[in-house]
Structure formats: structure tokens, C-alpha cells
């Protein structure tokens, strides 16, 4: 995989899978545009990436704010690869305990955030007849997680959005895919594939940020040119909940 000369935009790049993606894309020579609401952590990711000698720009932006997304997109210009990774997910409460305001917040960030980002960058991809869009979903969007009904709903929507949009742009050189992680353990040290024991997978462990980033990077590469409209689960052979 080689991303030299390619511009890659990643949302939610300050921590976790997004940060893992920034590192793996940098290792493959990509020019990076990193977006997050957490400026401090974005800055430390930028610092971490200096060793790879690639061009990195960071942008503080809430993806659920359409006007801000459009303003940042104008500064960024054309991107070849868009990774829609930013989301809210740490929430465990029953359906009736979940306030409507929280439903709206999850829909705004996890679904509309992807809509705004994609609307901002798709026209440039269509013009160049080249593009890779990778949405980060979840096994929750496939199986449905109890006590995460609103989250599961947003990820199910994202998987459907991926498949539908992919069909609209398939003959324009643009692929759209979704990567749906199972349980992932965030790595402090990006050089270590950090995982933990887990009863939720037949591999008896969680996945690492880097394992997820490797799949996202592959789908963004020219090597994945004939793969589109797919939701690929990366879950260590999940025990369906
Ligand atoms: N970690 C897991 O176990 C797991 C499992 C399944 C799916 N996922 C999905 O993977 C993706 C990344 O998960 P993670 O565990 O790395 O998450 P994380 O919480 O570690 O990172 C998410 C990043 O998104 C940023 N963010 C949140 N809201 C934002 C907004 N409105 N605008 C811009 N940035 C925003 C956060 O600041 C954070 O840096 C998410 O889409 C999540 O739903 C994660």
C-alpha cells in the first residue's frame, strides 16, 4: 500500500482507532488532515507523527456542526480518502432511560456528522473520478446491543448509508465501505498491538487500534479497487449478542 501523493482526512483522529489510522496512513506516506473536537490530543497526535516525515494538518471541529464542517473542508481542499470515524459510543442505559436529547445528540454526531463530512468532500471526488470513503460502524449496528439502542441505531443507519451511497457513485471511481469493529482496546503505545481478554469473541480477546487501522487503510488503498458497498466486521469472530 502506498499513499504518497494522496490526501487522507480522518475524523475523530485524536484518540483510539482514529489515531491508529493516522499512524498507519502516515507510515504509508499519506498527507494527513486530522479532525477532532479535542485540540490538545490532536496536537499530541501531530507531534507523534513527526517521525514519519509526512505533512500533517490538524483541525478542531465538531462534525455535527454543518457550517463548521464546510468551513474546515474549504480550508482542507480536495481529499482522496475520507475516514468517517468520529462518534459517541460510551453509553450504557436502557431504552427508556435514554433521554430524547441524547438520541438527537447521537444521531447528530454519528449519522449527520458523516452526512456533512461526505457532502463536503464528495463533489471533489466526483470531479476527479477517484475517491475512497470508509465509514466506521460497529457490530452494534448489525446485531443490536441491549442498553445501547440509540448507538446501535446510528451504526445501523451508517451501514445502510454506506451501501446506498456506494451504488450511486460506483461508476465514478469512488468506493464506499464500512468497517464494523467488535470490542477494541485503545493503545497507549502505538507500536504495540494492545489487546485484552474478552468473552465476546471466539478469539477470546479484543481487537487493537492497529488491527482496525490496517483494515481501514487497506480499503482506502488502490489494492482494494473492486471492493465497495461492503460492511466488513472486524471482531475476532464475534459471539453474536
Ligand atoms: N472502541 C470500540 O470498542 C469500538 C467498537 C465498535 C465501534 N467503534 C467505533 O469506532 C470509532 C472509533 O472508536 P474509538 O473507540 O476509537 O473512540 P474514541 O472515543 O476513543 O475516539 C473517538 C474520537 O472522536 C472524537 N469525537 C467525538 N465526537 C466528535 C465530534 N462531534 N466531532 C469531532 N470529533 C469527535 C473524540 O474526541 C475522540 O477523539 C467510532 O465510530 C466507534 O463507534 C469502536
Image (cartoon, rainbow, N blue to C red):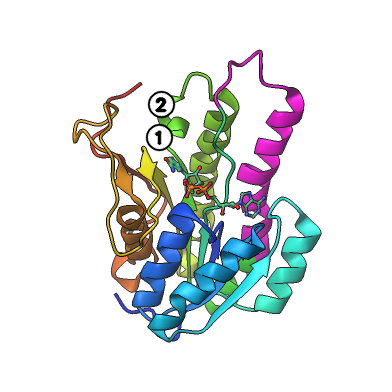
Is 94 inside the magenta-drawn segment? Answer: yes
Query: How far across and how far down the image is residue 212, in percent?
Result: 35, 53
| Residue at (32% x, 79% y) in the render | 2
Is 154 inside the magenta-drawn segment? Answer: no
Q: Viewer-proximal residue, 132 or 10?
A: 10
Residue marked by disc 1: 139
| Residue at (71% x, 37% y) in the render | 105
Numbered label tally: 2
Q: Quadrant of residue 28?
A: bottom left
3D distance between C-alphas at marks 1 and 2:
6 Å
Does the residue at mark 1 contact the one at mark 2 (Cβ under 8 Å)?
yes
Q: Residues within 10 Å of mark 2 (few under 14, many from 20)?
A: few
Residue marked by disc 2: 143
> In the displayed structure, does residue 190 sit left or right of residue 132?
left
Relative to residue 74, is residue 69 depicted above or below?
above
Main secondary structure found in the magenta portion: helix
Instruction: Describe the element under mark 2 as helix, strand or loop.
Output: helix
- Quadrant position of the C terminus in the picture: top left
| Residue at (30% x, 65% y) in the render | 191
Query: How far across and how far down the image is residue 118, in percent?
Result: 62, 59
Q: Which residues are magenta?
A: 92-120
Q: Viewer-proximal residue, 107 or 226?
A: 107
Query: How far across and how far down the image is residue 234, in percent?
Result: 31, 44
Q: Quadrant of residue 222?
A: bottom left
Instruction: Describe the element under mark 1 as helix, strand or loop.
Output: loop
Amino acid at each position: 500500500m502506498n499513499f504518497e501523493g494522496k490526501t487522507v482526512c480522518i475524523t475523530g483522529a485524536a484518540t483510539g482507532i482514529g489515531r491508529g489510522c493516522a499512524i498507519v496512513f502516515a507510515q504509508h506516506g499519506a498527507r494527513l488532515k486530522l479532525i477532532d473536537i479535542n485540540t490538545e490530543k490532536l496536537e499530541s497526535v501531530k507531534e507523534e507523527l513527526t517521525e514519519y516525515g509526512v505533512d500533517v494538518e490538524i483541525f478542531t471541529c465538531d462534525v455535527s456542526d454543518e457550517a463548521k464542517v464546510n468551513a474546515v473542508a474549504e480550508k482542507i481542499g480536495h481529499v482522496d480518502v475520507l475516514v468517517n470515524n468520529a462518534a459517541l459510543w460510551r453509553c450504557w442505559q436502557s431504552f427508556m432511560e435514554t433521554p430524547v436529547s441524547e438520541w438527537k445528540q447521537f444521531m447528530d454526531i454519528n449519522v449527520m456528522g458523516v452526512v456533512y463530512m461526505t457532502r463536503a468532500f464528495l463533489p471533489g471526488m466526483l470531479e476527479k473520478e477517484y475517491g475512497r470513503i470508509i465509514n466506521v460502524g460497529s457490530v452494534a449496528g448489525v446485531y443490536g446491543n441491549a442498553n445501547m439502542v440509540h448507538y446501535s441505531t446510528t451504526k445501523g443507519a451508517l451501514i445502510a448509508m454506506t451501501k446506498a451511497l456506494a451504488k450511486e457513485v460506483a461508476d465514478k471511481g469512488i468506493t464506499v465501505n464500512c468497517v464494523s469493529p467488535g470490542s477494541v482496546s485503545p493503545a497507549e503505545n502505538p507500536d504495540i498491538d494492545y489487546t485484552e481478554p474478552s468473552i465476546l469473541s471466539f478469539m477470546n480477546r479484543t481487537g487493537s487500534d492497529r488491527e482496525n487501522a490496517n483494515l481501514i487503510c487497506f480499503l482506502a488503498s488502490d489494492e482494494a479497487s473492486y471492493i465497495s458497498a461492503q460492511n466488513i466486521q472486524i471482531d475476532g469472530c464475534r459471539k453474536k449478542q
